[in-house]
Amino acid sequence: LPKNLIPPRKDLRLEALADLLQGKMVARCHAYRADEILEFVKLSKELGFKIACFEHASEAFKIAMELAAEGIGLSVFIDSWAYKVEASEGIAYNAAYCTQKGILVSINSDGGERMQHLFNDAAKAMKYGGLSEEEALRLVTYNPALQLGVDKIVGSLEVGKQGDIAIFQEHPLSAYTRCEMTIIEGNIYFDRAQYLKEREEMEKRMKEQKKKGGQK
């Protein structure tokens, strides 16, 4: 080869596809309808890559047996549907039903704000589908860790794991509970009691400053 030959430009998208086809990576596919989910499963068999999980998958309950047979997981909304055509046939029983059919299911927040309410969403799977407390909690703890391949470091409270813990003042699946403390990798990132104390002190200082300003 010529010494001045320029190597091909690096294409990270194609490299990721190559890793997928070589079995070094697995696919997480965004889909809603049962027919498009099955079509992608057929494509994976044709090209020889593995699907780890379908995200959103509003109509997964229609093909739960097929997904269970393929060992494909689901990351779904608990009770959000009909906001567009392809999500119009979703049901609140989707997560629980698919769990009971042997599918590894997690609940998807799809955003930072909604992430705060995942424990409420998990509780809904007890009402809509009759999951046990443990099964419901796994939807937002251990199951997603398994799906992402990080279950050795997070997802459950065990010796040797990172120690990511949320502490509630009532049962975490209660509609009336609130988070009192958040610990990440053993470090306290949020402490409600400390927060309220600091807020009270700040409000006190502001009142004093306002009072001094009025006296001037």
Image: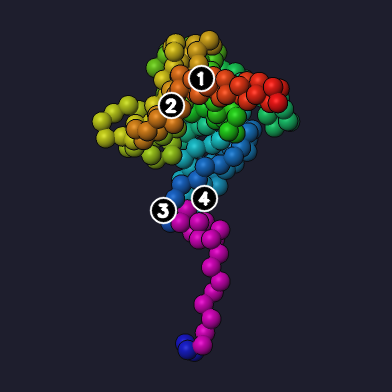
Q: Nearer the viewer, mark 4 or mark 3?
A: 3
Residue 21 lies in magenta, yes or no? no
Which residue occupies the foreground of this view, 85 or 124?
124
- Whichever of callouts 4 and 3 sits on the residue coming sooner in the sequence is 3
Circle 3 SS class: loop
Distance of mark 1 from mark 3, alpha carbons?
48 Å
Q: Say which quadrant the C terminus sits in.
A: top right
The spot of residue 95 in percent (x, y) is 52, 22
Residue 138 x, y percent position in the rendering = 42, 23
Label pair 2/1, CB-CB below 8 angstroms: no
Verify CB contact (< 8 Å) between mark 1 and mark 3: no
According to the image, label 2 marks what residue? 182
Q: Secondary structure at mark 1?
A: helix
Please report whichever mark, 4 or 1, sits nearer to the chain's N-terminal start. 4
Pointer 3 residue: 24
Q: Label 3 is placed on what type of residue? A: Lys
Task: Give, as a three-letter code, the residue at label 1.
Answer: Leu
Q: How crowded is the residue under tag 3: few (<14 C-alpha within 10 Å), some, or many (20+)?
A: few
Name the side, left or right, on which 111 lies relative to 138: right
